[in-house]
Image (tube, grey):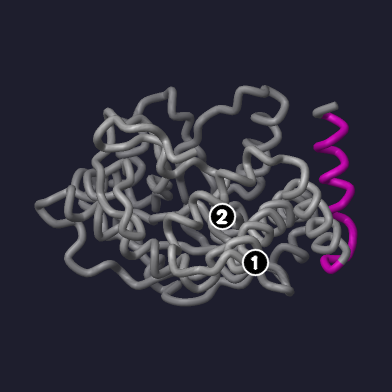
Amino acid sequence: MTHFSLRLVQWVGRLPLPWVRALGAALGWALYLLIGSRRRVVHTNLRLCFPHWSARQLQRQTRQTFVYFAQAWLDRGWLWYAPPEVTLARLRLVGAVDELDGQAATLIFVPHFVGMDAGWTAMTQQLSRQFTTVYAAQTNRVVDAWILKGRKRFPNGRPFDRREGFKPVLQALRAGEPLCLLPDMNYDPKDSVFVPFYGVSAATIPSLSRVAKMGRAKVIAMISRITPQGYEVEITRRWPNFPSDNWVADTATMNLCLQAYIDRDPAQYYWVHKRFKDRPDGGPSPY
């Protein structure tokens, strides 16, 4: 079944983009209607982060989150398999792309927007530097191999397996290979600090500040947004005064920056994750 599903995604990727997006919208609606447990997760996240929204807004944004999620999933069929000229035409790098010129140590904050794989594909295809990231192996070996192959499609992408340890990642960063980090999820609370995210205390990995300091690197961000033409991949300017000497304050700053990126189109963020699962007082999960 897994092999069939992945081949189906690959086949869908051959269709014209409006067809792919229409199928993604239909799949998103189906997921919204059928997977009640995950629908409640998305609704809870949005209710906590946007308490001023009406019930109708919450329902609409919850449903749209599933649509964007499904569209981004089907888009991998062309991101990872379409001819290079197709991805080149559909992926638009914008913003401070010149921040990636030269060989300065560069740490890229990559929030979990549903289109994050499009951003990785755009950079590794269109820019001359080699980019690295850290990935966690999937439990399903077939899916794991499929994702890893897709992220290695262009030779300027070098994912490191988290099980290999952090030393080679840090060496690559110091040698001038920009490192993409995704520290905006609720991981192990023992390795996290609790800082505000939309005013709600959230367990957050402080790795962006710590790695930037260890790697003597500047910090920028990459935000990938779905558009009717494909994706817009925004590169931000260097964050001023980051990292500082206070990694807890830096982690709170990271969340504030993330909020500003999300506010442009909230439903494109990965709200299907239980962002507030761990509570600072050990209290019950809101889910």
Q: Residue at x 73, y 52 (%)?
A: 70
Residue pushed farthest left?
245
- Crowding near the residue tagged with mark 2, few <14, some 14–19, many ≥20 C-alpha atoms within 10 Å: many
Q: Secondary structure at mark 1?
A: strand
Measured from the top left, where is residue 9 in percent x and y?
82, 45
Between the C-alphas of marks 1 and 2, the distance is: 10 Å
Residue drawn 89% across the image and 47% down it: 11
Name the dominant secondary structure of the magenta segment: helix
The residue lying at 55 percent from left, 27 percent from top is: 137
**Residue at figure coordinates x 51%, y 39% from the top left:** 159
Residue type marked 2: Met
Q: What label sits on residue 41 in the rendered view?
A: none
Q: Secondary structure at mark 2?
A: helix
234 falls in the magenta region: no
Q: Is residue 80 above or below residue 227?
A: above
Q: Is residue 58 visible?
A: yes
Q: Is residue 9 left or right of residue 216?
A: right
- Reply above or below: 124 against 57: above
- Residue 238, given in percent of the width and then of the height, sits at 30, 68
What x and y, as percent, mark residue 247?
A: 17, 48
Residue 160 or residue 281, whichever sits in front? 281
Amino acid type of the residue tagged 1 in the rendering = Ile
Q: Can you tell which quarter of the image residue 71 is in?
A: bottom right
Foreground of the two, 225 or 284: 284
Asked whether, in this view, residue 3 is left or right of residue 97, the answer is: right
Q: Is residue 156 visible?
A: no
- Residue 26: image x %, image y %? 83, 56
The residue beneath circle 2 is 116
Residue that label 1 marks:
226
Range of residues picked out in magenta: 3-18
Q: State yes or no: residue 8 in magenta.
A: yes
